Amino acid sequence: MQNYDFYLLDIDHKTTEDNIDILLFGKINNKYACLIDNFENYVYVISKKNINSFLEKLKKEKLITDFKEETKFFLRQKVDSFKINFISQKNVDELKDRLRSFDKEIRIEEKDIPVTKKYLIDKKITPLNTLRIEATPIDYEGINTDIILKLNSLKPTEEFVEPKLLAFDIETYTKGTVYSNPERDPIISIAFYGRNFKKIITWKKITTDLDVIFAKDERDFLKEIEKLILDYKPDYLIGYNSDNFDLPYIKKRAEVLNVNLNFLEKGIRLTRTNRGSCKLAGIQHIDIYIFISRLMAGTLMLDSYTLNEVSKSLIGEQKDEIDFNKVHLVWDKNSKEIETILEYNLQDAKLTYKVAEKIIPNINALTKLVNQPPYDVIRMMYGSMVEHHLMKKTRDLNEIIPNKPSNEDISDRMQSSYEGAIVIKPVPGLYENILIADFKGFYPSIIVTYNTDITTLTKDKKNSFESPEINGKHYYFKKSPKGFIPEVLEEIVYLRNKTKEIMKKDKTNNALKGEYYALKTLANSMYGYEGFFGARWYCKEAASSITAFAREHILKVVKEAEENGFKVLYGDTDSIFLLLGKKKISEAEELIEKINKKLPKLMELDLEGVSKRGIFVSKKTEETGAKKKYALIDEKGNISVKGFETVRRDWSYLAKETQRKILEIILKDGSSEKAVKYVQDIIEKIRKKQIPNEKMVIRTSLKKPIESYKNLEAHVVVAKHMQKMGIPVSVGTTIRFIVAEGLGLMSNRSKIPEEVEEGSYDSEYYINNQIVPAVEMIFEALKKDKNILIKQKSQKTLGEF
DNA sequence: GAGCATCGGGG
DNA sequence: GTGTACGATGCTC
């Protein structure tokens, strides 16, 4: 037996005949290692009957291995329970039946928690932590890590080591619009990027100064990939959409070429689950696209989540594009230009690495809070993260974890909805001096203040918080003791505030920023969790009360503001927009202070900022102003646009540009005259054919095979034409077209841009179907009729409406 | 407008 | 596998 420091990264399990083996993957002295441990699974049973002798009987039958009485809490109620140990999951169903036959009312809890998750929770260990272990070397079938040990004892430490990152990206053989197919098209190259490390592997020899490994052929190339990864020994192997593209592609190529990728032999295996995620045991496969598009989309608010867009937004770098129409020519010719492909390849790996560097602190921090491997964390939804954190917390509070809802429960819960957040709709128009105030951490502060969760819900009105009226009813939540979720949440909020304080002194600490992000994420997800149909601690009464309390608080602010002579322009969920009018900012600050004095301790209304000017627009279908469709400008001239990004992606660049310009002119100028003139000028330019064709290109992607389109939409007609010309077209191909001059249906006049002579686009189509729709709502908000735009330029008509 | 199907990212 | 369980948007009736 020997002592080691083990860096934990991943966990798996294997069921043997009489045992559950827990497999812990990680590193010892920078070598891949696997620890084998035993785990005896168990459930908690709560019964009002005396089940002692019955359990003895079950033990004799070997249905269970052991049991003992424990005083626990179930949903914060003290209960006498039995902890029952068993080996095989098969026994659980039988156990359930037997126990039910003895006591119909019996509760069997903690029976549906995957054993690996339970192990991590119970041992209070988390990936990225260094464990001090005592262990003995052994052999274990199917595991091929450098080191394999049988675990004797384990102790977590305070050490959290930064994982070693390696980003990668592949380039595949492609002919223009035809997407690469792994059954047919080879992988051309792969690029790796790490700290002070970059390497490209390809299998055609060219002269280049790039850091390239040249493989003999594609089979050799695949083996080189594996070799490089195992030599570099990353903790995180990072890709961009690698769950659904790079790794499955590599796997398929290995199958096609009959290469045995010994990813397997080193304890790394490729498996695809139904949602297409690729797991490599031992190495954490981190697909940052998954994390960014699913979990960071709410804050990033991008139109699309391509590597280029994400890089632009997160690290301020953009891609140099290559011409995919040429890739096959370059590759087939063995031309020197292959170097451009390799450069492009390396660029992608580099951007992936840099973006990863930026967000990995967030992932690491979540990993610690959620107490699960980062591989799982990045693929989780918010609800799961909250739930794992809650499950972990039960161990400190001696709580039993409730079971997941049954299928019937889930469908019931999905049927029932409740009223959500408040929206005070604005009257469309242009406004000056807008003050924005919002509640800081609104929902979390409500949950903690009113102690709302399943464990405090009561019929007893005494010593309880009463919710506002909800469908003619009120709900009540005990004032004490603290509910389970409110207590856990209070700690998260406390830690978040503390982290924020430290961050002020230590502004460059990325790990700290990550922790703040993770705590904030978890805090903000708690309300959603209480109303989430799959939640173990689901409570619709609590969730609907939280939104009701929120609406009530916002309405109180509205009332108070109006009583003090402010006009309320707009409100949404946790914020309200006030018109300052002739009032000074200091008066608004006084109002906010006055409101805050009356608020419960944890709730706070903040002055978010003052906008010099703002335009609020309605949606086509609504008379009143729409939620989240407005643009603001502050004193410094910074413009923020909300809600307009929903403009259809298939608009021409000119339409998008015009819309953006119009907003800018109106906000800067405070009047619509110039904006009207701008549009009139654009329209005139279109008519005079002064706008270059490239700005008129409309992009639409083919959503299904061409044959299955019943209606001949413009892009379908164009796609068919492209096919006839021998340009390959398939599902997913982006069709670019321009609507050309002429007679007949617009779709029949749509042509690929290369076929349209400069200036011979259909001006009236672009004016009526692109420019006007892009701006008409904005002018409507300003009470300008859209016809003013189309009329021939004439000074008289300006401003008449 | 509701209900069903597909797409997202990737070359 | 000690099972599962996306969500936003577009398309069709």
Image (tube, coloured by chain):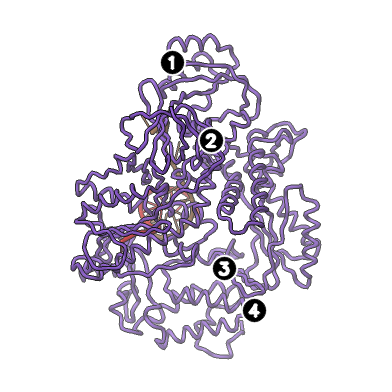
Chain colours: A purple, B red, C brown
Mark found first going from the N terminus, 2 or 4: 2
Can you identify the residue that label 3 sits on?
A641
Can you identify the residue that label 1 sits on?
A63
Q: Are marks 4 and 3 on the same chain?
A: yes
The C terminus of chain A: image quadrant: bottom right
Left or right relative to A739: residue A5: right
Measured in 3D between alpha carbons, the distance from the residue under mark 4 to the one under mark 1, in whole angstroms, is 79 Å
Front-lying residue, C2 or A312: A312
Can you identify the residue that label 2 sits on?
A156
Which chain does tag 1 point to? A
Measured in 3D between alpha carbons, the distance from the residue under mark 2 to the one under mark 4, in whole angstroms, is 62 Å
Q: Residue at x 62, y 24 (%)?
A: A72
Mark found first going from the N terminus, 3 or 1: 1
Mark 4 or 3, closer to the camera = 3
Residue flagged by tag 2: what amino acid is it?
Pro
Front-lying residue, C8 or A171: A171
In this rendering, the answer to whether A150 lies above or below A662 is: above
Q: Which mark is residue A20?
A: none
Measured in 3D between alpha carbons, the distance from the residue under mark 4 to the one under mark 3, in whole angstroms, is 16 Å
Which chain does tag 4 point to? A
Residue flagged by tag 3: what amino acid is it?
Val
Does residue A569 appear in the picture of this structure? yes
Residue flagged by tag 4: what amino acid is it?
Gly
For residue A216, what is the image quadrant? bottom left
Can you identify the residue that label 4 sits on?
A670
Mark found first going from the N terminus, 4 or 3: 3
Q: Give the farthest residue toward the front.
A: A2
